[in-house]
Amino acid sequence: MKVLVVGQGGREHALVWKLATSPLVSDVFCAPGNAGTHEDAVNVDVGPGDFDRLIRFAKHEKIDLTVVGPEAPLVGGLVDAFENEGLRIFGPSAKAAELEGSKAFSKDLMRQANVPTADYRVFDSAKAAVSYVEDRSEQPLVVKADGLAAGKGVSVCANRAEAIAAICRMMINEEFGAAGRRIVVEECLAGQEASILAVVDGKNILTLEASQDHKPAFDDDRGPNTGGMGAYSPAPIVDAAAMDRIIEKILVPTVHTLRKAGRPFRGVLYAGLMMTPQGPRVLEFNVRFGDPEAQPVLMRLKSDLAAVLLAAVDGKLDELPPLEWDPRPAVCVVMASAGYPGPYEKGHPIRGLRAAGELPEVKVFHAGTVRRGDQVVTDGGRVLGVTALGESIADAKLRAYRAVKHIRWDGAWCRKDISDKARQPLA
Ligand code: AMP
Ligand code: GLY
């Protein structure tokens, strides 16, 4: 079977790498891919937004299954476009992807499905939003742009003044363009976060093992939010009882309500959760694998991912045997360019990739890299996801950072505390 992965980040490299190990898969292509997917697959020079050329390529190469990594093409209808041409593709339709494409839609669906989440209000005018905030007692609030904003559209505000400033940035200065013309203002939740990824075939739900992302740029969760500076799996905070509760109270009602609304969900449903003393609460839904969560989660998956994704496309997840997991934890440390998540330079040659990749139980997933002649050079803010398995979380962390030490480029940096939260006593 020939597989095409759409996207170019660390998640897509992990997907390519895992799919290439499947006995069902003969060829893996990645559009457009990066220097890492070039090692594990054949890169195709077509961007994720170029639907016509992706379809032409899939037809010409007789691709049997296309897997979409990022959210933008899903929200834009790539899956619908492929299905209209009779091509098999894993991912939600545009109507189901609205769960990530519109935070207002997602919150309203949660309210309808009785899914636990922060209390919220939706606003289409800055004036109404500001007067709502002014009328409330002083308390932390979260202001969210409705549409896609590359993970930057959320402001956690400590007080009224910060919330009003965030509303003005989004609705008056239009910092996120059309994505911020409508906003959600919600209650601020406290606790530890966890990411739950589930493969869904419209009706059946197959949860993957839990993971935890590290969104703030700097150690101890300080600094601006990023796309994610590292992740680990499993997440001890999500024990078996919590997972049962998440399935029962969150995943099942969400999938059921989407189906009833004529938006059946097929793809990866990603629930970003706050584990509060009152139980898990949804912070956001995404409609695809998490990045960097996919890297440690897929490194631990022993089952054949291609078989799982095919079963999801065909509505037959209930016919699969239970997933098999490597019991060992995995830790992924993101190495980033100087300046990220702000402006950064590209084109710095990366040294030490081979030495790092040869260490036992280590896989260096590429995110923002490109080949230039014989060299691999930086090409993004998040450059690499250095991932390792270990006998314990501490051991996996040690192995990942040992690999990080081999890798160098001008301005490379990473957080030093990825996975430490897993080993702290829970508050
Ligand atoms: P989102 O893109 O909605 O996941 O938000 C990005 C980050 O903002 C989350 O990972 C949380 O750290 C934080 N966040 C979002 N919503 C809330 C909330 N209601 N309370 C506290 N933190 C939040
Ligand atoms: N790691 C966060 C995300 O994939 O949205």
Image (cartoon, rainbow, N blue to C red):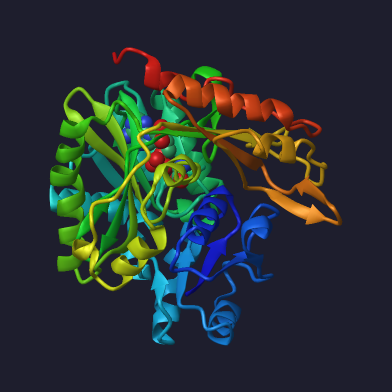
Q: Position of residue 257 (x, y in %)?
A: 16, 60
Q: What is the quadrant of residue 74 in the picture?
A: bottom left
Residue at 59% from the left image edge and 81% from the top image edge: 57
Position of 156 relative to 171 (above/below) = above
Q: Is residue 189 visible?
A: yes
Q: What is the quadrant of residue 191 in the picture?
A: top left
Residue at 29% from the left image edge and 28% from the top image edge: 189
Position of 418 relative to 41 (above/below) = above
Q: Is residue 118 visible?
A: no
**Which of the pair 296/279 is nearer the observer?**
296
Position of 45 relative to 245 (above/below) = below
> Horizontal placement of 229 versus 375: left or right?
left
Quarter of the picture containing the C terminus is: top left
Residue at 16% from the left image edge and 26% from the top image edge: 278
**Which of the pair 76/174 is nearer the observer?**
76
Q: Position of residue 353 (x, y in %)?
A: 73, 39
Q: How many labels sit on residues?
A: 0
> Horizontal placement of 191 versus 36: left or right?
left
> Horizontal placement of 408 versus 362: left or right?
right
- Residue most extreme to the right: 373
**Which of the pair 299/218 is nearer the observer?**
299
> Horizontal placement of 71 versus 112: left or right?
right
Q: Position of residue 231 (x, y in %)?
A: 47, 34
Q: Position of residue 55 (x, y in %)?
A: 54, 81
Position of 117 relative to 21 (above/below) = above
Residue at 27% from the left image edge and 43% from the top image edge: 121
